Image (cartoon, rainbow, N blue to C red):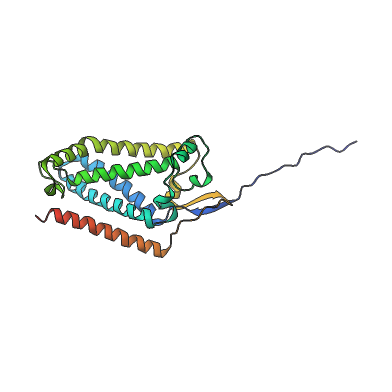
C-alpha cells in the first residue's frame, strides 16, 4: 500500500513595519481646522451675535492655514509639500491602479489634489471674509484698505459662492474617507489620530520626524502665525 500523498501547506505571512506618517503638529492642525470650519459654517447660518464667533473662528482658520503653509516646508517628511506634489503621470497611474508603493504612505496623488484644493479654497474664503461687509454690524479688518467695488465682490463671493464650495469640498472629503474605508479597506482616519501606519517591511520609506524639538518648532511657527493675524486684525481696527 503506497503512502497517501500530501501537499504541504504554505502560509504567506507578510511582515509589517510601523511608519510615523503624520507628526503631532500636522495631526493637531487637521483636527483643529476641521472643528473650526464646522464652527464657521454653523455660526454663518445662525447669524446674529454668533457672527462674533464667526469672526474669531475665521481668524483661527487663517492662523492655522498660515501655519500649514510654513509647515509644508519645515514639517515632517510626509507633511512637506515637496513630498506630495505629483506629476500628472503619477495621478493617472494611481487612477489606473498602478501607483508606486510609496505613493500610498502619505497623501496619495489623488488625495494631494484634494488637500491643495481645500487649502486654496479656504484661503480664498478667509481672505474674502477679511474684506466683507454685511452693512449691518460686522465687517472684516481689511475693508478699510480696499475699494467699495472690491468689498462688494468679496462679500458676494464669501456669502454666495465660497461658502458652498467649502461645504461641497468637506462633504467630498468625508465621502472619500468612507470610500477608502469600506471599498479599499484603507483606514485614513486612524493614522491621522495616532500618527502611525502599518506598511510592508522592506519598503524604503522614511518615518516623519516627530521629536520634541520639532514640536517646539511647530509651537513657535504657530505663535508667529497667530501674532501676524492678530497684528492684521488690530491694523484694521486702528483707524
Q: Is 111 situated left or right of 239 in this image?
A: right
User: Residue 81: image x %, image y %?
Assistant: 39, 50
Q: How many marks?
A: 0
The residue lying toward the viewer, choosing from 226 and 109, is 109
Q: Quadrant of the N terminus?
A: top right
User: Residue 139: image x %, image y %?
Assistant: 14, 46
User: Residue 226: image x %, image y %?
Assistant: 25, 57
Residue placed at 79% from the left, 39% from the top? Answer: 6
Q: Is 127 situated left or right of 96 in this image?
A: left
Residue placed at 42% from the left, 42% from the top? Answer: 111
**The residue positioned farthest toward the right in the image shown:** 1
Residue placed at 38% from the left, 41% from the top? Answer: 114
Residue placed at 36% from the left, 55% from the top? Answer: 71
Vertical side of 174 occupied by 20: above or below: below
User: Residue 20: image x %, image y %?
Assistant: 48, 55
The residue lying toward the viewer, choosing from 199 and 98, is 98
Q: Quadrant of residue 122?
A: top left
Q: Quadrant of the C terminus?
A: bottom left
Amino acid at each position: 500500500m503506497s503512502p497517501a500523498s500530501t501537499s504541504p501547506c504554505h502560509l504567506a505571512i507578510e511582515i509589517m513595519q510601523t511608519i510615523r506618517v503624520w507628526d503631532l503638529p500636522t495631526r493637531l492642525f487637521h483636527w483643529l481646522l476641521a472643528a473650526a470650519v464646522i464652527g464657521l459654517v454653523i455660526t454663518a447660518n445662525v447669524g446674529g451675535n454668533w457672527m462674533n464667533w464667526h469672526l474669531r473662528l475665521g481668524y483661527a482658520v487663517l492662523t492655522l492655514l498660515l501655519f500649514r503653509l510654513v509647515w509644508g516646508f519645515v514639517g515632517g517628511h510626509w507633511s512637506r509639500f515637496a513630498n506630495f506634489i505629483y506629476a500628472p503621470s503619477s495621478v493617472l497611474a494611481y487612477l489606473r491602479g498602478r501607483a508606486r508603493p510609496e505613493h500610498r504612505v502619505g497623501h496619495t496623488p489623488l488625495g494631494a489634489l484634494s488637500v491643495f484644493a481645500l487649502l486654496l479654497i479656504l484661503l480664498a474664503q478667509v481672505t474674502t471674509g477679511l474684506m466683507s461687509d454685511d452693512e449691518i454690524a460686522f465687517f472684516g479688518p481689511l475693508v478699510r484698505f480696499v475699494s467699495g467695488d472690491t468689498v462688494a465682490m468679496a462679500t458676494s463671493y464669501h456669502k454666495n459662492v465660497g461658502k458652498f464650495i467649502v461645504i461641497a469640498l468637506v462633504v467630498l472629503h468625508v465621502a472619500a474617507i468612507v470610500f477608502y474605508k469600506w471599498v479599499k479597506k484603507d483606514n485614513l482616519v486612524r493614522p491621522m489620530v495616532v500618527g502611525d501606519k502599518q506598511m510592508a517591511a522592506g519598503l524604503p520609506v522614511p518615518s516623519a520626524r516627530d521629536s520634541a524639538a520639532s514640536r517646539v518648532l511647530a509651537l513657535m511657527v504657530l505663535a508667529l502665525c497667530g501674532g501676524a493675524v492678530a497684528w492684521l486684525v488690530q491694523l484694521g481696527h486702528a483707524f
